Amino acid sequence: MGEVRPERLVVAVLTYRRPERIAALVPVLVEQAADLARRAEGLLVSVLVVDNDAAGTGATAVAEAVARAANRQGGADEAWPVTTVVEPEPGISAARNRALRASSDQDLLVFVDDDEVPHAGWLHALWATYHGTGAAAVAGPVTSRYATEPDPWVVAGGFYDRAHRSGLRTGTVVASAATNNLLLDLRVVRRAGLVFDPALGLSGGEDTLFTSALTAAGGRIVWCAEAVVSDVVPADRLTRAYLIARTAGLANASARVALLLAPDRGRRTVVRARLLAAGLARGALGALGIAVAAVRSDVGQDAHGRRALARSRGELLATFGKVLLPYAR
């Protein structure tokens, strides 16, 4: 009888011109990896950094962080199982697909973003839920915290709220998930032949399309309430202009994914009509809310109205084939 191959898990983080953040995050991921390896006998855990900057600014920052750690440990770098690759093709799809290719010898892959901070026990919670449910993927919650105190308008508008997933219990099946906190069984992914769509690389929505395709292929995605990461929102992402543009971009990407998921022309026509009706209604309600807010001097209603109007713009543009590119460089 041959020797049983140990299970292999890699934590993949994508980065683009955030050298300070990736240098600070890698030690946290290494600590999470070491904790999981101690608690799961026989499991091999590593960290993969995909630098989407052709100049390799992130790769350099990671190399320096690893070297500093090795010096502190007297040259012993065994505790830092970190691999860094540079993906020069711009776009989040290209970077995520590079992570898939670089993980060809791995069984499980966990995606996390470079502007997030995992809570204690995060990685173990994802892995334990995967083994406890037999799911093809496990998603966890993301909570936002602000680098600076936000404008009351920002808070009232709920621009960083994720209410649609709040209160979900561990083990709950979800139809799709974001890749900012997601474990994937790569064996299921490979059998289904899934990759991230390059056409969505600069617009976003590639993760929703990917995980929806995973569900369509028979893979279950389950929720893990204990696997929490915090999204650190910098000051430049708390301005009204940024948040309105972000809201429109998210709505545009979501509408495009809905159209892409339609199986045929007839169904796409139905989806397009539904999006058009919803976008027009949302826009009308948003404009009304803004008008009422101006009369009442209601900050919260103004924020909600402008958020609705931005969502309407994104949806309506998508119905007419127009694409917003928030990740364009």
Image (tube, rainbow, N blue to C red):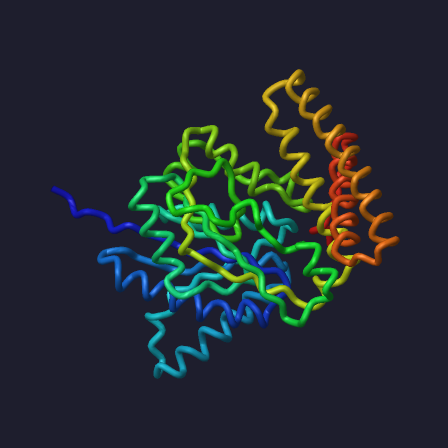
Q: Give whichever of 41, 319 is nearer the camera.
A: 319
For residue 26, above or below residue 73: above
> Could you tell whether 291 is left or right of 88 in the image?
right
Residue at 34% over, 48% down: 129
Q: Pick the quarter of the image with the N terminus.
A: top left
Residue at 50% over, 68% down: 25
Q: Position of residue 220 (x, y in %)?
A: 41, 36
Q: Position of residue 259 (x, y in %)?
A: 66, 29
Q: Position of residue 123 (x, y in %)?
A: 38, 58
Q: Give whichever of 83, 207 is nearer the camera.
A: 207
Count the labels in the image. Answer: 0
Q: Pick the quarter of the image with the C terminus.
A: bottom right
Q: Position of residue 212 (x, y in %)?
A: 52, 34
> Could you tell whether 61 is left or right of 129 in the image?
right
For residue 63, above or below residue 220: below
Q: Hey, which quadrant is residue 135 in on the image? A: top left
Q: Hey, which quadrant is residue 148 in on the image? A: bottom right
User: Can you name the residue that lies furthest to the top here?
Assistant: 266
Residue at 56% over, 61% down: 231
> Could you tell whether 18 is left or right of 195 in the image?
right
Residue at 51% over, 49% down: 166
